Image (cartoon, rainbow, N blue to C red):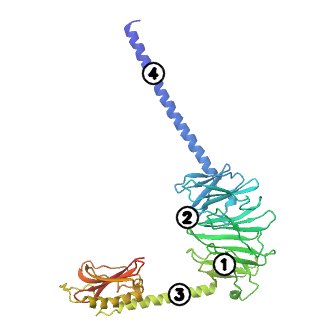
Amino acid sequence: MPDENKEEMKVVRKSNKWMIVLLIIVIVILSLVIAKFIYEEKQEEILKDRKYYSLVDTNFYLQDGKLFILDNNENPIQVPGDFSQMTIADYEDENHQSNTKFGNVYFYYYLDDKIYLVMSDSVSSGEWVIKELTNGAIGIPSNSKIKYIRISGNYGYIFYIAPDGTGKILKSTTEGNYWTEIETDFTLNDNCTLKFLNQFGMTVDGFLIVPSDDGEKCDLYRVDDTTEETLEKIDLTELTNDADMDYYSMPTYFDSSGMTLVMDVRKNVNDSNLTKFISSDDGKTWKTEEAYREQKRQEEEENDASIVRYNEMAENLDESIYLTDFDNYNIDSNEVKISEEKAKEIAEIGFQESATRIAAEGVRDTEKEYIEIREVSPNNYFIRKYNEATDVYTNIKRKAYVVIKENNMGNGVMVYVDVTTGLIIGGSAFGD
């Protein structure tokens, strides 16, 4: 074969080789694109199937018999256990309150005739504990119905209905590891409601409603998870002045503050006439709504009057003791004309003013007191009005006795006494 033909064949073979390589690269790229498209389509389908349910700052969903919880980055984390017999309805807010923000993430599930509790201190830790609630140690009967479950810190509660219709409440003081039954002198059944109230990530004490068989009346108990007095009966008879008003609703939040509770009391469950009661101490004590609003009105009046008095005192400070006109305070000398003892005497007047009107900690419970001379800029600590910001007159530099009183918690007050004029030219409070 002529040499030129051989060279042409080499070029053709080389060209074909590059064509094959190029074709392989194209096929690989197309395969990746198709795989990505299929993956995204599948993920979109999965997302459509997800049924999210929000509990405080927790999102989770059930899929193919598995339970997934989303971390703070929206990444799904599978919760261990077989959730094939569960639905989202089993984790309604009324009966299940799990909170990832403060730890103690927990879920329960039924499997055949047994009940399991799954717990973790943190979603991100990946450490889960599974406990069988129907075992001999905890003793929930098989085929029971979980009415309510809640774990917060060391304390936990489980309210369940046994197959025979009787209800029991279990309490844990060991982060859900061990459970004991709360003894009651009343009968719990499926009509009873146990719930803890959560607002803004805070958990207050809970409440238990125990209706009568006919639903005409009920008893309400306050559930305190930090004392041995677990169930405390709430009796509003003295406030209602009507013994027939004895059907309680579950307390809810009165307003968006998350600090005040409201509860309806009526003659029976179907009565449209009701009396509202308000509590501002987590249900320990209650007032009628009218009495509560009157109390708030009086508090507002007293607060307004207190602000007026505060401002009047600031306006009427003794100008022979306190500097009140900072704009015209032009003292040429920084000569020390006031003795240390005299400065302490003057500062004591400022401490008493602070304790009466501004800040008392460190004054009324002084653990240590000291004095030193510093160069300071005066401020309006004593002359400022209610809710006024602190103004520091940085254009003025004065040598002053700084007299400090402090308590053993690190809280205190300091008073500035001008070494030349003896005027109190400012001060501050420090600590918590």
Q: Earlier in the sequence, mark 4 or mark 2?
A: 4
Residue drawn at x 63%, y 86% is 290
The type of residue carrying mark 4 is Lys
Residue 316: x %, y % from top left: 35, 93
Q: Is residue 75 visible?
A: yes
The type of residue carrying mark 2 is Phe
Q: Earlier in the sequence, mark 1 or mark 4?
A: 4
Q: What element carries label 4?
A: helix
Q: How far apart are labels 4 and 3 at the CA level? A: 91 Å
The type of residue carrying mark 1 is Met
Q: How far apart are labels 3 and 1 at the CA level? A: 22 Å
Q: Is mark 2 on a helix, strand or loop?
A: loop
Task: Give the numbered dot on residue 299.
Answer: 3
Identify the residue position indicated by label 4 in the image: 17
Which of labels 4 and 3 is toward the front?
Answer: 3
Identify the residue position indicated by label 2 in the image: 102
Which of labels 1 and 4 is toward the front?
Answer: 1
Residue 322: x %, y % from top left: 30, 89
Of 323 and 29, which appears nearest the observer?
Answer: 323
Q: How far apart are labels 2 and 1 at the CA level? A: 28 Å
The type of residue carrying mark 3 is Glu
Q: Can residue 322 be seen in this view?
A: no
Identify the residue position indicated by label 1 in the image: 263
Vertically, is 118 above or below 355? above
Which of labels 4 and 2 is toward the front?
Answer: 2
Q: In this view, does 329 lie to the left or right of 282?
A: left
Q: Which of marks 4 and 3 is nearer the N terminus?
A: 4
Q: Which of marks 3 and 1 is nearer the N terminus?
A: 1
Q: What element carries label 3?
A: helix
Q: Quadrant of the C terminus?
A: bottom left
